[in-house]
Amino acid sequence: MKSFCTKILLSAVTLIVLSAYTTVARPAFYYQIKVYHLKTAAQENTIDTYLKTAYLPALHRAGIKDVGVFKPISQDTSEKLIYVFIPLKKLTDLDKINIKISQDKQYAESGKFYLGASYNDAPYTRIESILLKAFSAMPEYSLPKLTAPKNERVYELRSYEAATENLSANKIGMFNDYEVEIFSKLDFNAVFYGQVISGSKMPNLMYLTTFNNKADREKHWAAFGPEYKKISGLPQYQHNVSKNITLFLYPSDYSDF
């Protein structure tokens, strides 16, 4: 009887250990952020129509469940921007998804006004692409749990550049060990945290937190300050950010986020 009970106990322990290992070993998502640079309201309207009626539906058919589309709350008068956030389970999915879309007849028909644009009437100035790998502390993206209408929300996209690769890795370690947990505890509704593995600004990390409105955002950051002070002064985390860029965005009405 003792032997039988011992076996049952060992089996239970083994299952717990395996379960814990599976949770820790979850593979990290990869993220592509496409940034459309525009000059005119006509271009913005064209890209909105293309994304809403052609590109996002095609991504959904290709297996991307959730796609984010965000715009700056305060647009620069000289340049308009549209951010498209595409989560990928594997880095190789980027090529596979693009191939699927290129073979999608419905996409070709729905997006022909965009795909067939002439050289002297281009729908954008340029497209920028940023590739990121999710942090181990949050290996998958999350949909915001907010109650406000999309046009009232404040999404905060932050970019932390570092002087060297080692210092950037140090800041990522700081997030994995402490900051992600603080953000989670305070309900910052983070969509993702990621290391930039390809982009115009490197070494770099980016993350996106979301709020119902500006007042909600201010309240959350006020609560974050005292928690962050507990770790920001630690000697091992000094000088690991050389430049912080903060963008305030809102989701389009057709965004999945």
Image (spheres, rainbow, N blue to C red):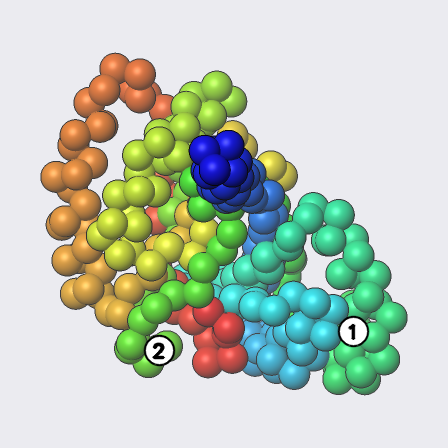
Q: Residue at x 72, y 74 (%)?
A: 61
How busy is the neighbourhood of tag 2: few (under 14 within 10 Å), some, or many (20 plus)?
some
Q: Nearer the viewer, residue 189 or 252?
A: 189
| Pointer 1 or 2: first along the chain | 1
| Residue at image location 60% in from the left, 37% down from the top | 197
Dividing the picture into quadrants, the one containing residue 209 is: bottom left
Which element type, helix, strand or loop, lies under badge 1? helix
Tell me which residue sits at (44%, 65%) in the image. 143
Q: Which residue type does callout 1 highlight?
A: Leu
Where does label 2 land, which residue?
151
Tell me if I can see residue 195 in this picture. Answer: no
Amino acid carrying mark 2 in the image: Asn
Rendering coords of residue 247 (x, y %): 37, 54
| Viewer-nearest residue: 13 or 241 | 13
Residue 29's disc number: none
Residue 233 visible (yes or no): yes
| Residue where numbered disc 1 is placed | 115
**Placement of 29 over or under 215, stated as above or below:** above
Residue 137 rendering spot, x and y as whole percentages: 43, 40
The residue located at (60%, 80%) in the rendering is 52
Front-lying residue, 93 or 79 = 93
What distance separates the C-alpha of mark 1 from that of mark 2?
A: 29 Å
